Amino acid sequence: MRAFTRTLRPAVPRLTIAAAATAAALVFGTLAATTAQAASVATGDSRSVSQPAVPSVCQTLTANLATSNEQFSSSNEASPPDTSRIQNALNACKGTNKAVELTNSGGNNAFLSAPLTVPSGVYLVINAGTTLYATRVASQYQSSSSDTCGAISSSDNGCNPFIKVSGANSGIEGIRNSSGSQGTIDGRGGQSIWGTSTTWWQLATTAGNENEKQNNPRLIVFSGANNATLYNINLVNAAFFHVTYKSGNGFTAWGVRIKTPATARNTDGIDPDASSNVTVENSYIQDGDDGIAIKGGSGATSNVTIVNDHFYGTHGISIGSETNDGVTNILVKNNTVQGTDSSGNVSTLNSGLRIKSYPSKGGTVSTVTYINTCESGIAHLIELNPRYSSSSSTSNIPEFTNIIVDGLKSQNSASGATSIIEGYNSSHITGLTLQYVSLDSSSYTAQYAAVSTYSSSLNPSSGTGVTLTKLSSPVTSGSVPSCSFPSFPSL
């Protein structure tokens, strides 16, 4: 049985900020000083996480198909031939803590399947040079919802995911060879939905233009899967979100390469939600929405580490927008964020470090620490935005507290690059500490924020309800990072 050693750490204290609507400038100044003294650094995942390993094999399946353009014969497209044999192998190996390995055979390098479920105690492993392709037949993803998969409506519940991981001690992994190639899962989002001339991505774009929602399938959903792993796998061309990890405790994503164009709408990279003890490490993420979106929409999320990752053309390393059940103890360390993808497409919402929410989906986001972040070609360098979307409700007003940016450098920023430092109102003030920050654009908008700075080129001091405290010493030792930006690796 695979297990990670869990080392419990002291609970991270939350910083509480109170501000009266009519507080005088002197009181705000005292509040800002208190914020600086009380700032505490996030510790992230409470487990001691190390690089995963590929488990021993329970069953090996060899490919019977070949393709060089994501296309298959009409008969295979209509009835994906590999669904039953993959699912039967996964079911047979349930509880063994071993792998069902997909591998190529001569010139045959492809598997074509309808949706699959990975049960507890088994791993789906894909060998280097081998690709598992998702069906293009929308009806094969159809959920029990009244929404129709492959159609546009006011909600987006019509599709089951391509792969659902439903049990503990399970996961999806690739085998990386000596040249750096690793196994691939291809959602074929840029190919037409079977029986139509519209691609999944075109459907998403049309839905956005009509202020509606597309019913597209997510690529991978982990649901209630404790101690789950995503390792050394390529995830490409998702029709919707690439990875959702929901309602679980213990998730490691390591060596993941997500490659989908920046122009493909709503193709989030990795989204933890209502979960705890999550690490995303040593991964490369390129997509058409958030690179990471940490959410607390259907339960609280806590103890998350995002470390040594690289982002291309995404909407940034994000928290939100659903934060109504709370997000806390988030450590984001040693990451790079570039505003264009590997093909030169500019992000459609070009952000770096981002916390977003709004009053019908808001809650408390607390104890978030960003350490040594490098940005290139970014438009919104720091975005703390409690009014991300319009809302007639004020039942869940966002509040961002104890946010620390420790070591941030931007270069070659987009024209008009700026930062957004905002709280919702005088009773919901954003508490932010900036230290060792070197930005090539110090432009900002700010309101209802108590900001403390040390060795920072960004010093927000104007705006309604904004106070600035210059610290005489840093909260922790640090420095401005020295930045280099790796190219997206070959798949």
Image (cartoon, rainbow, N blue to C red):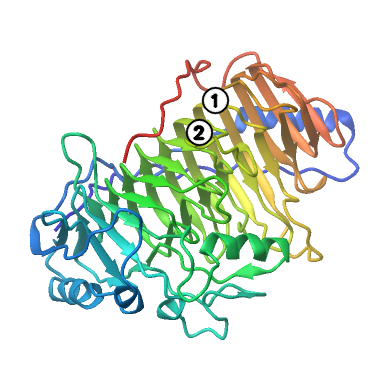
Q: Quadrant of residue 26?
A: top right
Q: Please name the residue that numbered disc 1 is placed on.
A: 406
Name the foreground residue: 137 vs 216. Answer: 137
Q: Quadrant of the C terminus?
A: top left
Q: Quadrant of the N terminus?
A: bottom left
Identify which residue is drawn at 55% across, 48% down: 290
Number of numbered labels in the structure image: 2
Q: Position of residue 216 (x, y in %)?
A: 51, 68
Identify which residue is drawn at 54% across, 34% down: 344
Amino acid marked by disc 2: Val
Helix, strand or loop under label 2: loop
- Do the numbered discs 2 and 1 sit on residues whose CB atoms are within 8 Å? yes
Vertical relation: 408 (above or below) 323: above
Amino acid marked by disc 1: Asp
Q: Quadrant of residue 161?
A: bottom left
Dot 2, how many residues are within 10 Å of its Cα: few (below 14), some (14-19), or many (20+)?
many
Q: Please name the residue that numbered disc 2 is placed on.
A: 41
Vertical relation: 28 (above or below) 278: above
